[in-house]
Image (cartoon, rainbow, N blue to C red):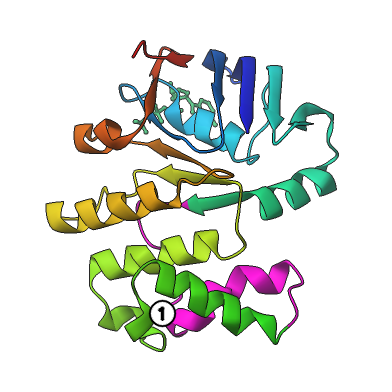
Amino acid sequence: MIALNEVGRTFPGPPEVAALRDATFTVDAGEMVAIIGPSGSGKSTLLNVLGLLDEPTSGTYLLNGVDTGKLKERSRTALRATTLGFVFQSAYVVAHLDCMANVALPLTHLGVPRKERPVLAEAALRSVGLGHRLHARPNTLSGGERQRVAIARAIVHEPRVLLCDEPTGNLDSENTQAVLDLLENLVTGDRAVVVVTHENEVADRAGRTVKVVDGHAAPLAA
Ligand SMILES: Nc1ncnc2c1ncn2[C@@H]1O[C@H](COP(=O)(O)OP(=O)(O)OP(=O)(O)O)[C@@H](O)[C@H]1O
């Protein structure tokens, strides 16, 4: 699904900063990979590159077989919208919309017919265990439930890769476990999950770990 070869990202500055120097690793469908590393090591830079939010200044990044360096901006945006789902530390849900409407939002941008949107949104909410809260407003939910709404929204269009940035950073240990169970269930034969985390219990759930040190990102030996 993902193949990075000697990917670097240098910010021109001044001063010039080589935030990512050499990221070389793959992520296959059917696996969950944790990205770990000290503060300032380049994890966010790497996640931005993986998420097609930023472009490498060197190396190649293949996503779902597509050489992303060769894409024009429009094609990058389209590939991002169809192939990737994003989960952040804070569940950026829209307060005045109910869960169904929040989860259906990305489908609007993808041109999914209006009639199909509620069907897909309900299925996504049921898949994260929120079938009983379809029409709840986010402010009536717990923090863990809100994060599950954000996950439902991230997967409603069936992305091949789910990119998560500290997805349990704001949760207590019980909700952390629930979200990790969920992420584990989302790893299927045709989907990969990538999780940037500081937390050992999150990394422990991943099949493999990529460690970032001073901009060098490589798999840890098993
Ligand atoms: N837009 C930018 N311009 C210049 N330097 C940047 C920019 N973004 C990040 N950096 C630098 O690149 C390095 C890597 O930053 P990055 O945010 O990727 O680290 P991180 O591992 O995600 O850190 P943390 O765990 O603290 O979030 C840091 O030295 C940072 O100051």
Q: Which residue is mark 1?
A: 95
What residue lies at 71% left-to-right and 84% top-to-bottom? 114
Q: Is 28 situated above or below 123?
A: above
Q: Specify whether residue 11 is in view.
A: no
What residue lies at 38% left-to-right and 62% top-to-bottom? 91
Q: Specify whether residue 61 is in view.
A: yes
Residue 32 rendering spot, x and y as whole percentages: 42, 36
Residue 145 rendering spot, x and y as whole percentages: 29, 69
Quarter of the view holding residue 92: bottom left
Q: Secondary structure at mark 1?
A: loop
Q: Does residue 112 show up magenta in the picture?
A: yes
Q: Nearer the viewer, residue 44 or 85?
A: 85
Is 87 left, or right, of 77 in this rendering? left
Ligand 1 location (quadrant) = top left
Is 92 left, or right, of 159 in this rendering? left
Mark 1, Cα crowd under 10 Å, few <14 / some 14-19 / many 20+, is few
Residue 161 rendering spot, x and y as whole percentages: 57, 44
Q: Is 120 situated above or below 167?
A: below
Q: Is 172 situated above or below 140?
A: above
Quarter of the view holding residue 36: top left
**From the Cβ of disc 1, is ligand 1 less than 8 Å away?**
no
What residue lies at 51% left-to-right and 51% top-to-bottom? 86
Residue range in magenta is: 87-113
Q: Does residue 146 show up magenta in the picture?
A: no
Q: Nearer the viewer, residue 60 or 83?
A: 83
Quadrant of the image for the C terminus? top left
Q: Is 161 situated above or below 57?
A: below
Is 48 left, or right, of 76 in this rendering? left
Amino acid on which disc 1 is placed: Ala
